[in-house]
Every structure is written in structure tokens, then in C-alpha cells.
Amino acid sequence: MSDTSGKPAEAGDQRLLDAVKARLDQSEQALDGVTLGRLRAARREALATLGAERPRRTWWEPMRGLAVAATLATLTVSLWSLSPGPTDTGLMPLEDLALLTDSEDLEFYQDLDFYLWLDSRESANGDAEPVGQGGQPLGRDRQTG
Amino acid sequence: MERRAYRLAMIATSSREDALDIVQDAMLRLVRGYGDRAADEWGALFHRILQSVIRDWYRRSRVRNRWRQFFGGQAEDPADGPGEDPLETRFASADPGPAVGLAQTQTLAELDRVLHRLPLRQQQAFLLRQWEGLSVRQTAEAMGCSEGSVKTHLSRAVKVLREELQEYWLENDDT
């Protein structure tokens, strides 16, 4: 048997292969009527779709593809530019967890930026304690909830 | 064309309904995808599509059987066991060898059994080369692999057939 030609070469193999081929040929001719009928029907059905389902190609068809691609690209860039930065995304689960488990009022978190800014100003001015919700010192405010 | 395609699909699937579905699917894909090609190109294209559809069927069967076994059932087809890749693995029949003196009417069923249990790649290489008479290049195109792979798969397939069939079949086959 030859591995380079892709065709077995030994005489014994060839005799076997001829016998196999003859048997397969017989089997092809011996298909039952029902199977043949279904195969013919499948062939007819396939040929019936020829021309019926294939839309005519028009000159603007490639343009349509380009338009879809351009729209998708624009949409992707827009969504990407509007999405939160990587820092926000990375902190989301922990922030969510803190919000869910802390007894602090939600309004406190909504104004958190303001209090942090206020805190930084107070610290810069040398004052001792940051201010929390309602003007209370931040540490005490969070403890009392 | 459809007769032989059906036999190829039948050997691959061992299921009449699946084989008919595969042939129908391949014909529809041919017409829809390549209906505007010249008729003399259809033969090669059809082989390519048919083999592709058969490979898809094999992959789906593997996944289906894996899930079936996961939930405690049994694989539908022993050639599609979950632990092996039927596209690549070597023939691994657990059945005893064919009995000497098998009646001639049974030889076709026996041949189908042996061919069906070949790994799909070997089965495809053998049938396309030896039965369809495609060249190595045409077979490689139909199978979507290299010509070297075709030669390797064919060589292994013939080795299995020789081991499984030659001793008794040639002695008992008077065709």
C-alpha cells in the first residue's frame, strides 16, 4: 500500500477494494422505492428554490453592506465613548456591596462627591474633622446612621 | 447524484431519516449558494457541501450524546462516544470480528457496519477516493483538509477494512 499516492497498491488490497466498490455500487442501485421517492422529492424541492429564493443582485447591494458596517462602527464608538471609565467599572461590585450593607442613607451616597470635596477643603484649611450629612462630622454621622 | 449521496450519508449516520435530511440539506445549500454556477461545477461543490453537512451532523451528535450521558442516558451511537473524537480517533470496535461463512446477503450490512464504525475522516477519505473516484486533491477539497491528511486517513481506513473484511469476505463473496 502506498502512502504517497493516496491509493492502496497491494494486489490483495486492490481485490478487496474492488469487491467493496462493487458491493457499494449494488447498494446504490438497490435502494427501495420509498427512499428513492423521497430523494426525488428533495431534489425537486431544491431545484424549485433555484431562482425563486435568490434575490436579484443590484448595484447598490455592496453599498448596503458598507452602510451597515458604518452604522455599526458609529454605534460602537458612541457606546464606547459614553460608557463609564475602567476605574468605575472595576469598583462597581464593591461599591454596590457597600451600598447594600451599609445603614447610611442613600442620599448620603448621592452627595458623596460633595462631602469628599468638602472634606478635602476642610483638610486643606487645617480643620480637624470632616463634615457629614446635615453638617454633622462625617465619622460620627456614619456611626449614628 | 442523490442516490450515492444518500448512501454516503447513510453509512455515516446509520439512520435513514438523518441521511435523507442530510441529502436534502446539502441539495438546498448547493442550489441556494451556488445555483448560478455552471452545472459541471455542481458535482465537486455538492461533495464539499455534503461532507460538510455530514461533519456538522457528527459534531451535533457528539454534543447530544455527551449531554445524554451526562443526564444518565446512553449514547445513541457507539461511534459517537463522549470520550473520543470520531473525527480523528482510530477504529475501536468492541464487537467481535465478523463470523466466517457470513451469508452473501449479509455482506452489505457487514460492510456498512465496518465503514460506519470507521472514524469519520477515514470513512470520508475512503468513500470519496475509492468509491467516488475523486483525486487526492478533490478529496482534500471535499473534506476540507490537506492532501497529506487524505492519504493518511485512506491508508488507515484500508488497513482496518483489510483486517475486518479480507479474511472472510473475499472467500465468501462471489460477485
Image (cartoon, rainbow, N blue to C red):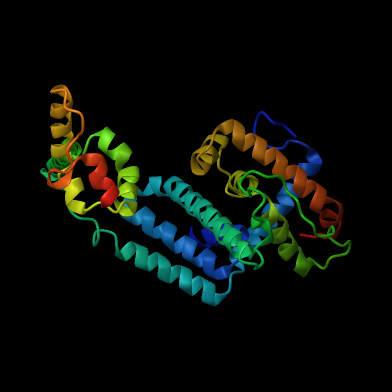
Farthest right residue?
B100
Query: Which residue occupies 14% across, 42% down?
Result: A71
Total labels: the figure holds 0
Give me the residue at 76% from left, 47% from top.
B160
The residue closer to the viewer here, B44 or B12, is B12
| A55 left or right of B50 in image | left
Residue at the spot x=26%, y=37% of the render? A88
Above or below for A130 versus A100:
above
Where is residue B50 shown, x and y percent of the image? 48, 53
Residue B34 placed where, x, y %?
33, 49
Q: Which quadrant of the figure has residue A40? A: bottom left
| Image quarter of residue B103 | bottom right
**How far across and how far down the image is residue A18, in percent?**
71, 49
Residue B37 vertical position relative to residue B21 in the rendered view, above or below? above
Of A125 and B163, which appears nearest the observer? A125
User: Can I make out residue A65 in this image?
Assistant: no
Nearer to the camera, B87 or A3: B87
Quadrant occupied by the C terminus of chain B: bottom right
Relative to B86, residue B96 above or below:
below
Spot occupied by residue A83 in the image (x, y as percentages of width and height): 20, 40
Q: Given the current orientation, which residue lies at the most extreme left position?
A: A60
What residue lies at 18% left-to-right and 35% top-to-bottom? A116
Residue B105 at least partly seen? yes
Looking at the image, which is closer to me, A106 or B12? A106
Q: Is residue B32 above or below residue B40?
A: below
Q: In the displayed structure, does residue A129 sit left or right of residue B2? A: left
